[in-house]
Image (cartoon, rainbow, N blue to C red):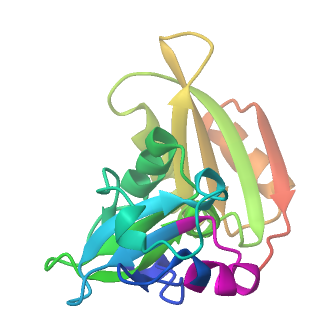
Amino acid sequence: MNIEKWINRTYPVFEESSTLEDVFSVKALAGLTNIISVDKEGRLSGTARLDEIDDFDLSKKLSEIVVEPVFYCRDSDFIEDAALMLIESHDYVLPVVNDDFVVVGAIGVFEILEGLMEFTAMDRPGARISIILEDKPGALREVVDFLAEKEVNILSIITSTAESKEFKRVVIRTDESDISLIADILGEKGISFESISEEEGFSV
């Protein structure tokens, strides 16, 4: 999933000629954690964490404080890439730039969680099925094809390593909320499952 939908385009961005006083004047209103500075053309010029510069002279210009950004996202990146970058950087927010290196906004932990929530269909009502499958080609397809045959619509599929390396845990979310019906369908095919639970879904 591309991050373009989840970019926070209202996150404050400051020209590098601005002072710390300018930044702190909007800090309380915007809930800033990271400073993003740009040059006169709007291109990313630097970043800094506010919790690391609280003792600085408020009259200092950002050009004297920010450092060249190591971590940033492009608006064409995938949300998984942004999540990994946030983990690696230990930052709360990363600037997002276009192909011309112009800052178009920012993406942070909250936006990542929103994106992953939609990506995994956590916000939609239905059922959550947890299955342990042998880690071999075709094992998942057999389950998916059979659910499709029974007209059970799949909203998302997530796989992870199970306790044994020879198996994988698969979590399938469907829009069918009748867990008894799903259990009967899986039983008909002889597909064993860890759990089936009804999901109410929610909206943000």
Q: Report the side of 57 relative to 66 (left or right).
A: right
Relative to 115, say whether 89 is above or below: above
Q: Of 16 and 124, which appears nearest the observer?
A: 16
Q: Of 202 and 191, which appears nearest the observer?
A: 202
The quadrant of the image that shows the C terminus is: bottom right
On the image, the x and y values in percent for residue 127 come to: 76, 59
Which span is picked out in magenta? 22-34
Asked if one can make out residue 169 in the rendered structure from this viewpoint, the answer is: yes
On the image, the x and y values in percent for residue 126 come to: 75, 66
Q: Of 22 and 116, which appears nearest the observer?
A: 22
Q: Report the side of 143 relative to 129 (left or right).
A: left
Relative to 159, say whether 152 is above or below: below
* Residue 117 falls in image quadrant: bottom right
* Residue 169 falls in image quadrant: top right
On the image, the x and y values in percent for residue 140 come to: 45, 38
* Magenta stretch: helix, strand or loop mostly: helix
Total residue callouts:
0
Q: Residue at x 41, y 56 (%)?
A: 82
Asked if one can make out residue 2 in the rendered structure from this viewpoint, the answer is: no
Q: Is residue 26 on the magenta stretch?
A: yes
The quadrant of the image that shows the N terminus is: bottom left
Q: Is residue 45 on the magenta stretch?
A: no
Q: Residue at x 71, y 38 (%)?
A: 187
Q: Of 66 and 61, which appears nearest the observer?
A: 61
Q: Residue at x 55, y 75 (%)?
A: 20
Can you name the residue that lies furthest to the left here? 100
On the image, the x and y values in percent for residue 202 come to: 80, 75
Q: Report the side of 77 relative to 89 (left or right).
A: left
Q: Residue at x 34, y 62 (%)?
A: 78
